[in-house]
Image (tube, rainbow, N blue to C red):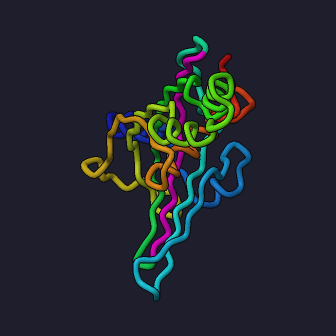
Amino acid sequence: MFRKCLFAGVLLATFTMQTSAISINELNGSPQFKNVYQKTYSFDNASSNRIVHFLNTYSIEGLEYAAPHYKLKGTFYSVDERARGWAITEYELTATYDTNYSLGSLIHAKESVKPSSAMYSVIKAAEAESGIQVELQGVKRYTWEGAVVNNPGQFVHQSRPLERSRFDQDLFAVADAMFVVAYQQHFDDIVVK
């Protein structure tokens, strides 16, 4: 009798477990995942490596809406294709936006002050402050087929402002895509008057 109950419990637990594994086929085939960043690079001339970020558009949630400040949280997947292996890593990104520093706002502010040399000032201001602060947390790592690889010790957790440079180009693209999903316009198109 005890064995039957134990077997029934194990069977019930097996079929009711929630799995959130993700595979490359699901990322490429499901409309809820949007390819927001892609880069191909090589460390040596023989191998080609590629990074692709997919945003889960269903995961975007607004945490703060007090214009000109916004805060969004979402999930994205980084697919790393390398010559020696590949992996899918799930990240949770919380982005805080200050639209006073969007390019539209910076251009508008500079035009109202000094229209002649405004573009140089806008570029300098945009390089100094992007207006986006992120908190990035690695959640899980998956194989290409979607099996979970438990490697929690190597996950990143960082909280920092984004730069408009090549260094942060990928995270800026993800944060901007989150803003587009939530507000139907790009972050840099917002003008605070």
Residue found at x 45% / y 62%: 87
Image: 59 above or below 64:
below
- Residue 74 in the magenta stretch? The answer is yes
- In-front residue for pair 41/100: 100
- In-front residue for pair 63/18: 63
Q: Which portion, as a residue range, is magenta? A: 68-82
Q: Is residue 58 visible?
A: no
Task: Assign the C terminus to one quadrant of the image.
Answer: top right
Image: 188 above or below 166:
above
In the figure, is residue 72 to the left or right of 179? left
In the figure, is residue 50 to the left or right of 103? left
Residue found at x 46% / y 34%: 129
Residue 69 position within the rendered picture, expressed as x and y whole percent measured from the top left: 55, 18
Residue 172 position within the rendered picture, expressed as x and y whole percent measured from the top left: 53, 43
Residue found at x 24% / y 49%: 153
Count of numbered labels shown in the rendering: 0
Residue 95 position within the rendered picture, expressed as x and y whole percent measured from the top left: 49, 30
- In-front residue for pair 181/103: 103
Residue found at x 38% / y 39%: 137
- Residue 140 in the magenta stretch? The answer is no
In the figure, is residue 69 to the left or right of 5? right
Q: Is residue 134 visible?
A: yes
Magenta span main SS: strand
Task: Assign the N terminus to one quadrant of the image.
Answer: top left
